[in-house]
C-alpha cells in the first residue's frame, strides 16, 4: 500500500510534537493534525505518471512502477508477478517500484489470491502486458528517430539504435508511447531467453516489512476515523435476543452501540459470502482500547436458533439451505461421523467390480482416519476500514478475491458497483480465511450508521470464535489383497461435517481395476471454508497414511510402492478422469528418493516417513526425519521434492515450501479446534497451539523438478502431504500407527 | 484519563490515556507507531514485542501506567541516528525472511534484545529466546539463520 503509506503522516505528526517541545497534549484530537492518506496518494500521483497497459506507470524522470494485481497475503506475489511483467518490459529491475494495485479487476483481468492460482493465471497476461509496453516504447523511439523498430534494442529501460548511436530511456519515451495504438500481436520470450524469471529475487517489500512501516489494514488511518468492534453470539447455534448498552455508552470515548443485520433477509449467499452470525452488536468509539473496554460493559441476551432457512447462490441458481439448530460438540461430531461411515452414501466413482474383489480377497486392510476443525489464525486479526458516503464506498480491505465481494457489498449495503473504491491492503496472513469478506460488509454497515470512516477490528478471540473453519473430516480406506500380496481393489469412503473431503479422481484412482469411492456430508451450523488446500489437506493425510500401511502389509518399501502404483497408472490407466499426470508424479518421487538418500536417516536416531500428493496443479513429496527428544517426537529434518512447472522466483518459492512444511508439521502434531456446546474451547493463542521456533525442524531441503512447463502454484501443494509424512515417520519412531489428528494427542504426548 | 510522560525511541512524549491502556495501543493509536503489531492481546504470540530499558517486553501486557520513565524502544527506533538499518534488519533482508511480514517486527525486536544480552547465542539459546514469537507463515528457519548472520556480522 504505497499510496496509503502512513510514514509521511507519522513524520509530520512527530514534527508537530517536537516543535512544541514534546509537551504537546496528545489526546484523540491528534487525528486532525494528520495529513490524510488520500492527500499523500494524490500528491504522489501528481508526478505525471504515464500509464501503459494498466500494469505499468512511468514518469518523465524515468521512474518505472509495476502494479501487482493480486492481493498479497505472504506468497510474495508483490515480487513474482511484477517479475513477469518486467521480464518482457526490460526495465531495470533493481530500480523498479512495485505497487499493490487497487481493486480494479477489469483493468487487471484477474485479482485472485487463492487456489494457488496466481502464477498460472498471471503467466500469460502479465508477460503480455510487459511486452506490449516495451513495443510501444520502442515504437515511440522508432518514430522519433525515423528508424525501423527492428533496428532497436532494449536493455535496462533504455532503447538504443546502434547504427546512429541514439538512445533514450523509458521516461523520455513514455508520453509518446502512451499515445500509440496498442500492438495487437506481441511475441513472448521463450524460457531459454529469460534473464529475470527463474532467478532468485528478494522480496520487493522487504524494507517496508522489517522497518515496521504501515502496510496492513490494521495500520491504516484516516481523518476522523473511528474504531469499531462487534459482539457476536457466544456459541454457534445461538443468536442475539436483546441487549443493554447503557453502561457501555457511559464509557469514555464511546460514540455508539447498536445492533445490525449483516446480510438482508433472503440474500442469496455466493461461495465466499460465508459468515457465522447475521446479527451483531457494534461498539464504536475513538480508540481501540476504549472500545475493547466498553465492549465488556454491553449486557447481551442470547437465545438458541431454530432451524434457519438461508438462500444460497449455487452454480445452478438460487437454492435453499437449512442451517440446523443445536449446540454442536466435537464429541458428537466424532460419534456421528463414525456412524455415517457405516450408512449408505453417494457413490462418487466406481471402476470394475470392487464388491467381487473384496469377496475374493485373502486379506482386507481397513483403516479409518479423522481430523478436527482447524482455525486459520492469520497473524493479523480480521479487520477492515470502511467509509461510506453518498458519493462513494471506500474500503481498505484485506481480501483474497475482491471481485467475489462485489455483489455482496452492492446488495447488502445498497451501493452502486461503480461507487466501490477499494484499496487492497497487504494481509497479515490469510490461509483461506480472508477469502470470506463478511467483515467488509460489517464495516460498511457500521460506517453508514455512524456516518464516519471506521476501522473494524476483530480481537484474536473474535477471530477464533467467529471463524470460517477447516471442517472436521473422516475417511475410511479399504484394500483387498489376494494370496500373492497383490492389491486387487481399493474402497474409500470420505465424509465430513459439513463437507466431504473426498476427491474421487485423485491417486490412487486410476491404478486399480476395482475402485469404489463414496462420499457423504452432514449439515452443521459451524461455518466452514477454504483452509490451505481445502479437502486435500485431510484427503492426503488419510490416503498417504493408508498407502504406507498398505505397503508394509504387502511387504514393500513405501516409496517404491508409490512409484510402482504410478507406473501402473501410467501404463494402463483405469478410468477416464484421473486428475494427475503419472509421469510428473513419478519424477517427483524419483527426485525425492535421490535427494533424501532414501533408506539412510539424517542422524542415527532418526526414523523416516514419506508421503506425496498432487493438488492445485502441482506435485509435492516429502521425506520427514523424526527423533524422540525427552520423550517427545521432534521433526528434525525434511527433504522436499516439488514439481510446480517453471519456478518463477526460486528464493520466494523455497520460502513458501519451507513455510508450508512447518505449517503442516504444526497442524499434524498440534492443530485442533474443539467445540463444546456450540462454542470453541480454544479462544486465543494461549490454548490454540501453533508451531513455534523450537518445534520447527533444523533443516528443510527443497528441490524442484527443473522444467519449462507453465508455472503452477506453491502456496497450497506442499502442505497436504506433510501430515502423512509425519505420521509415517512417527510410526517408525514409536511403533504406533496414527489415525486421528492431532497426532501428538493420539500419542498421548500432550 | 490521565497524563503520562513517556520516553519513546529516545524522545520525551506526553500522552493522555486511561491508565489501564496497554502500551501497545498507546503506541499504535496515540503515537501512530504502527510497526508494533496486535496479534493476540494475551502475550502469547510476540507480535507486539518492544523493548523496555533494552529488554524484550510484550507491549499488549503492559499498562501505560506501569511504564513510567523507562525507555521504550519500538521497531521504528532501532535504526541508527543516520537512519541506517539495524544489523538484524539487514540480515532479515539478506535472507529474505518474510512471507506475510506481520509478525516480523516483533521477531526482530526479540532478536535485537537477544543479541544485546547474548551476542553469540547457540542454536538452542536462539530457539528458547524466540519461542514466544509465533510466525504463522512458518519462517522460523530463516529467522534463526538471520539471527546467526546478524551475530556474525556484529563481531566483525
Image (tube, grey):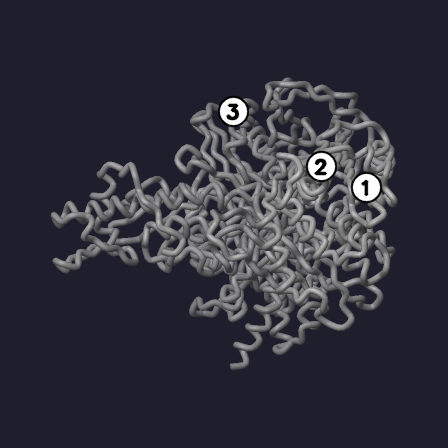
Residue at 70 percent of width and 39 percent of height: A469
Whether callout 3 and callout 2 share a subunit is answered yes
The residue singled out by tag 2 in the image is A502
For the residue labelled by badge 2, is the local secondary structure a helix, a strand or a loop?
loop
**Which residue position holds label 3?**
A410
Q: Which of disc 2 and disc 1 is earlier in sequence?
A: 1
Give the percent coordinates (x, y) of residue A422.
Answer: 47, 36
The chain that hosts pointer 1 is A
Q: Is residue A162 visible?
A: yes
Tell whether A155 sits left or right of A620.
Answer: left
A279 is higher (above) or lower (below) than A547: above
Chain letter behind tag 2: A
The residue carrying mark 1 is A478
Mark 2 nearby-residue class (10 Å; few <14, some 14–19, many ≥20): many
Q: Secondary structure at mark 1?
A: strand
Of residues B142 and B83, the one nearer the viewer is B142
Amino acid at each position: 500500500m504505497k499510496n496509503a503509506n502512513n510514514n509521511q503522516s507519522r513524520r509530520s505528526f512527530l514534527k508537530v510534537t517536537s516543535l512544541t517541545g514534546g509537551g504537546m497534549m496528545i489526546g484523540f484530537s491528534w487525528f486532525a493534525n494528520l495529513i490524510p492518506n488520500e492527500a499523500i496518494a494524490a500528491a504522489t500521483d501528481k508526478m505525471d505518471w504515464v500509464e501503459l497497459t494498466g500494469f505499468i506507470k512511468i514518469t518523465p524522470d524515468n521512474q518505472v512502477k509495476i502494479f501487482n494485481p493480486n492481493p498479497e497475503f505472504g506468497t510474495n506475489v508483490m515480487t513474482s508477478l511484477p517479475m513477469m511483467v518486467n521480464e518482457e518490459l526490460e526495465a531495470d529491475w533493481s530500480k523498479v517500484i512495485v505497487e499493490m494495485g487497487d481493486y480494479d479487476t477489469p483493468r487487471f483481468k484477474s485479482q485472485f489470491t487463492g487456489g494457488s492460482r496466481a502464477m498460472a493465471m498471471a503467466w500469460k497476461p502479465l508477460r503480455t502486458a510487459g511486452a506490449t509496453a516495451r513495443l510501444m516504447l520502442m515504437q515511440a523511439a522508432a518514430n522519433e528517430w525515423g528508424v525501423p523498430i527492428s533496428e532497436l534494442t532494449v536493455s535496462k529501460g533504455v532503447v538504443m539504435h546502434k547504427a546512429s548511436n541514439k538512445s533514450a530511456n523509458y521516461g523520455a519515451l513514455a508520453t509518446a508511447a502512451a499515445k500509440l495504438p496498442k500492438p495487437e500481436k506481441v511475441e513472448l520470450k521463450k524460457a531459454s531467453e529469460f534473464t529475470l524469471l527463474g532467478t532468485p529475487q528478494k522480496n520487493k517489500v522487504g524494507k517496508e516489512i522489517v522497518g515496521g512501516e504501515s502496510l496492513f489494514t490494521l495500520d491504516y488511518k484516516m481523518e476522523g476515523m473511528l474504531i469499531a468492534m462487534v459482539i457476536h453470539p457466544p456459541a454457534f447455534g445461538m443468536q442475539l435476543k436483546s441487549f443493554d448498552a447503557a453502561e457501555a455508552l457511559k464509557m469514555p470515548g464511546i460514540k455508539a452501540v447498536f445492533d445490525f443485520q449483516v446480510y438482508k433477509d433472503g440474500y442469496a449467499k455466493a461461495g465466499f459470502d460465508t459468515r457465522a452470525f447475521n446479527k451483531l452488536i457494534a461498539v464504536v468509539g475513538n480508540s481501540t482500547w476504549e472500545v475493547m473496554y466498553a465492549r465488556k460493559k454491553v449486557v447481551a441476551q442470547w437465545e438458541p436458533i431454530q432451524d434457519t432457512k438461508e438462500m444460497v447462490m449455487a452454480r445452478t441458481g438460487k437454492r435453499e439451505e437449512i442451517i440446523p439448530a443445536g449446540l454442536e460438540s466435537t464429541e458428537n461430531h466424532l460419534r456421528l461421523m463414525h456412524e455415517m461411515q457405516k450408512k449408505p452414501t453417494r457413490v462418487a466413482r466406481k471402476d470394475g467390480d470392487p464388491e467381487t474383489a473384496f469377496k475374493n480377497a485373502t486379506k482386507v486392510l481397513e483403516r479409518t482416519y479423522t481430523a478436527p476443525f482447524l482455525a486459520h489464525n492469520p497473524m493479523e486479526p480480521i479487520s477492515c476500514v470502511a467509509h461510506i458516503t453518498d458519493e462513494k464506498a471506500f474500503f481498505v480491505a484485506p481480501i483474497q478475491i475482491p471481485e467475489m465481494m462485489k455483489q455482496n457489498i452492492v446488495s447488502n449495503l445498497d451501493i452502486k458497483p461503480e461507487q466501490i473504491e477499494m484499496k487492497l491492503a497487504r494481509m497479515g496472513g490469510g490461509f483461506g480465511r480472508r477469502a470470506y469478506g463478511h467483515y467488509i460488509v460489517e464495516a460498511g454497515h457500521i460506517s453508514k450508521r455512524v456516518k464516519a470512516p471506521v476501522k473494524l477490528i476483530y480481537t484474536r478471540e473474535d477471530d477464533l470464535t467467529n471463524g470460517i473453519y477447516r471442517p472436521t473430516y473422516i475417511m475410511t480406506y479399504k484394500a483387498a489383497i489376494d494370496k500373492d500380496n497383490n492389491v486387487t481393489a481399493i474402497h474409500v469412503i470420505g465424509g465430513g461435517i459439513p463437507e466431504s473431503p473426498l476427491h474421487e479422481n485423485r491417486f490412487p484412482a486410476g491404478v486399480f481395476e476395482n475402485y469404489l469411492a463414496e462420499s457423504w456430508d452432514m449439515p452443521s451450523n459451524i461455518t466452514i471454508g477454504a483452509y490451505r488446500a481445502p479437502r486435500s489437506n485431510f484427503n492426503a493425510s488419510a490416503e498417504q497414511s493408508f498407502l504406507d500401511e498398505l505397503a508394509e502389509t504387502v511387504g514393500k518399501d513405501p516409496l517404491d510402492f508409490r512409484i510402482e502404483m504410478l507406473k501402473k497408472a501410467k501404463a494402463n490407466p483405469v478410468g477416464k478422469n484421473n486428475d494427475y499426470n503419472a509421469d510428473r508424479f513419478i519424477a517427483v518421487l524419483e527426485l525425492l528418493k535421490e535427494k533424501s538418500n532414501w533408506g539412510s536417516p539424517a542422524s542415527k536416531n532418526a526414523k523416516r516417513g514419506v508421503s506425496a500428493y498432487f493438488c492445485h496443479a502441482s506435485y509435492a513429496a516429502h521425506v520427514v526425519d523424526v527423533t524422540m527428544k525427552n520423550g517427545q517426537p521432534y521433526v528434525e529434518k525434511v527433504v522436499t521434492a516439488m514439481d510446480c512447472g517453471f519456478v518463477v522466483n526460486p528464493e520466494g518459492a523455497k520460502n513458501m515450501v519451507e513455510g508450508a512444511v512447518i505449517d503442516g508439521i504444526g497442524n499434524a502434531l498440534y492443530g485442533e479446534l474443539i467445540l463444546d456446546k456450540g462454542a470453541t474451547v480454544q479462544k486465543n493463542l494461549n490454548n490454540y497451539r501453533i508451531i513455534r521456533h523450537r518445534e520447527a525442524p533444523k533443516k528443510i531441503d527443497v528441490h524442484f523438478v527443473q522444467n519449462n512447463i507453465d508455472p503452477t502454484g506453491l502456496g497450497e501443494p506442499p502442505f497436504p502431504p506433510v501430515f502423512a509424512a509425519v505420521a509415517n515417520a512417527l510410526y517408525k519412531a514409536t511403533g504406533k500407527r496414527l489415525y486421528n489428528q492431532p497426532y501428538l494427542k493420539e500419542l498421548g504426548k500432550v | 484519563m490521565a497524563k503520562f510522560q513517556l520516553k519513546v525511541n529516545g524522545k520525551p512524549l506526553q500522552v493522555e490515556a486511561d491508565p489501564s491502556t496497554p502500551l501497545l495501543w498507546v503506541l499504535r493509536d496515540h503515537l501512530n507507531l504502527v510497526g508494533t503489531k496486535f496479534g493476540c492481546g494475551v502475550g502469547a504470540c510476540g507480535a507486539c514485542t518492544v523493548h523496555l530499558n533494552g529488554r524484550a517486553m510484550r507491549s499488549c501486557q503492559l499498562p501505560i501506567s506501569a511504564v513510567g520513565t523507562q525507555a521504550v524502544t519500538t521497531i521504528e527506533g532501532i535504526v541508527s541516528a543516520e537512519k541506517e538499518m539495524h544489523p538484524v534488519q539487514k540480515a532479515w533482508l539478506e535472507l529474505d525472511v518474510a512471507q506475510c511480514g506481520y509478525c516480523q517486527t516483533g521477531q526482530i525486536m526479540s532478536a535485537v534484545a537477544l543479541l544485546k544480552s547474548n551476542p553469540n547465542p547457540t542454536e538452542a539459546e536462539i530457539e528458547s529466546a524466540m519461542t514466544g514469537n509465533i510466525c504463522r507463515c512458518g519462517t522460523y528457519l530463516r529467522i534463526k539463520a538471520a539471527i546467526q548472520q546478524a551475530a556474525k556480522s556484529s563481531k566483525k
